[in-house]
Amino acid sequence: MKDANDDALWVQRLIDAARRGVVLDLQAGAPATQYNPSTAHEWPLDRSIPASAIRTVMSEVMRGEHPDLDPRGLRIQGARITGPADFTHITFSYPLHFSRCY
């Protein structure tokens, strides 16, 4: 069962990384066998970001709630994105990068 605070915690982690201009790297420290997205079903739960948290970040930025994001945008590496990724009607004026994600 998903904890009610999961989204809020992920939203904060994503915003913090975007403000600092760093990649939110969830594969750091993982064994090399967990670098390949085809093995995402074996990844630990702490590498699972709810798609709804990404949508929340994008929505908040669109509304001007986070004017201090780094121009490099939102960068995520080695994450398993869970749930439907519905970015309908979202205008995100920063780059959005997914690397080695599933």
Image (tube, helix red, strand yellow):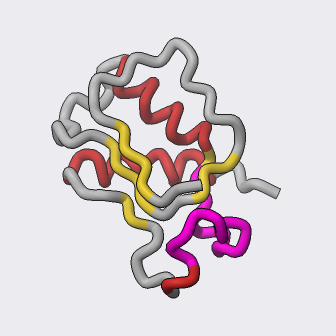
Identify which residue, 101 or 48, lies in the foreground: 101
The verdict on residue 38 being magenta is yes
User: In the rendered image of this protein, does residue 42 appear above or below residue 17?
Assistant: below
Q: Residue 25 at x, y = what percent?
A: 39, 65
- Could you tell whether 33 is left or right of 69 in the image? right
Quarter of the image for residue 73 reads: top left
Q: What is the span of residues highlighted in magenta in the rendered image? A: 34-49
Q: Residue 45 at x, y = what percent?
A: 66, 69
Q: Quadrant of the C terminus?
A: bottom right
Identify which residue, 80 or 55, lies in the foreground: 80
Q: Residue at x 32, y 26 (%)?
A: 65
User: In the rendered image of this protein, does residue 68 appear above or below residue 61?
Assistant: below
Q: Residue 39 at x, y = what percent?
A: 66, 70
Q: Residue 52 at x, y = what percent?
A: 61, 37
Q: Residue at x 20, y 53 (%)?
A: 20
Q: Residue at x 51, y 87 (%)?
A: 31
Q: Quadrant of the N terminus?
A: bottom right
Q: Residue at x 37, y 44 (%)?
A: 97
User: In the rendered image of this protein, does residue 17 appear above or below residue 34?
Assistant: above
Farthest-out residue, right? 1
User: In the rendered image of this protein, does residue 9 appear above or below residue 43?
Assistant: above
Quarter of the image for residue 51 reads: top right
